[in-house]
Image (spheres, rainbow, N blue to C red):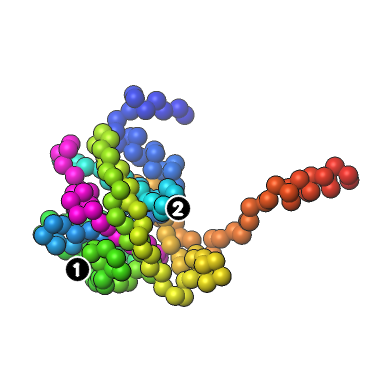
Amino acid sequence: MNFIVEQMKGNQVYNLLIGLVAPRPIALVTSLSETGQLNAAPFSAYNYLCTDPPVVALGVTNRPEARSVPKDTARNIRRTGEFVVNVVTEDLLEQMNLCATDFPADVDELEMAALTTVPSEIVKVPRIAQAHAALECRELTTMEIGRSRIILGQVVAMFIEDRFVDLEGPYVRSEELHAVGRMNGLGLYVRTRDAFINMPRIPYAEWKQRHAEGDEK
């Protein structure tokens, strides 16, 4: 079945796109308003883009009831220039989902989800205490495209619980962290527990040698 995007409604494009670009990591983003009010909201339109400098991207749609009115997260980041990406793991899945509820502006999502915060190392925005890993970010730029805002943030500090760090790299012990990913718009998520396949990249010299040995046979 083929779909021509310009012939489709916005919600139809959304439904199909997020079902195909999957699984997606989930950023539970904390941000502060200019008056210091804390906000927490999850976003799966999220990933890292480069490492030198380290940059992550968030895609944040505007409020559905008003075409050009930003959501709290986008507004806070634009006005304060800082945010924290809290990594969502299996044990935070239900709390993350609560933070996605469209509470009134004066309701604290973290309080509703029984989550607490601790100070970050560099940025003013706190990280979630129950999160096993977090990225402290400063806004590089925000681009408005259609009904969405693409936010680029430079990572200025990273928190990872000691038990999830392999100091040899250092590497993240991803097989123990148990991060979750979002699959579509129907409430489907994927676990990473017991789902890892170890497949190191093959250097060209090794690939060439394998093929040469195969030709000899």
Is residue 80 located in the magenta-colored stretch of the structure? yes
What is the x, y in percent for residue 38?
18, 62
Instruction: Name the residue at 67% across, 51% down.
Output: 202
What is the x, y in percent for residue 192?
48, 61
Looking at the rendered structure, which numbered label has been put on residue 169?
none
Looking at the rendered structure, which numbered label has been put on residue 51?
2
Is residue 78 visible in the rendered image? The answer is yes
Instruction: Name the residue at 29% across, 65% down.
Output: 122
Q: Which residue is mark 1?
A: 111
Disc 1 to disc 2, C-alpha distance: 34 Å
Compared with 159, 207 (above or below) is above
Answer with left or right where residue 181 lies relative to residue 118: right
Q: Which residues are magenta?
A: 66-91
Is residue 58 visible in the rendered image? The answer is no
Compared with 73, 169 (above or below) is below
Q: Amino acid at mark 1?
A: Glu
Q: Amino acid at mark 2?
A: Thr
In depth, the one of 82 and 14 nearer the eye is 82
State yes or no: discs 1 and 2 in contact (Cβ < 8 Å). no
Is residue 167 located in the magenta-colored stretch of the structure? no
- Element under label 2? strand
Residue 123, image quadrant:
bottom left
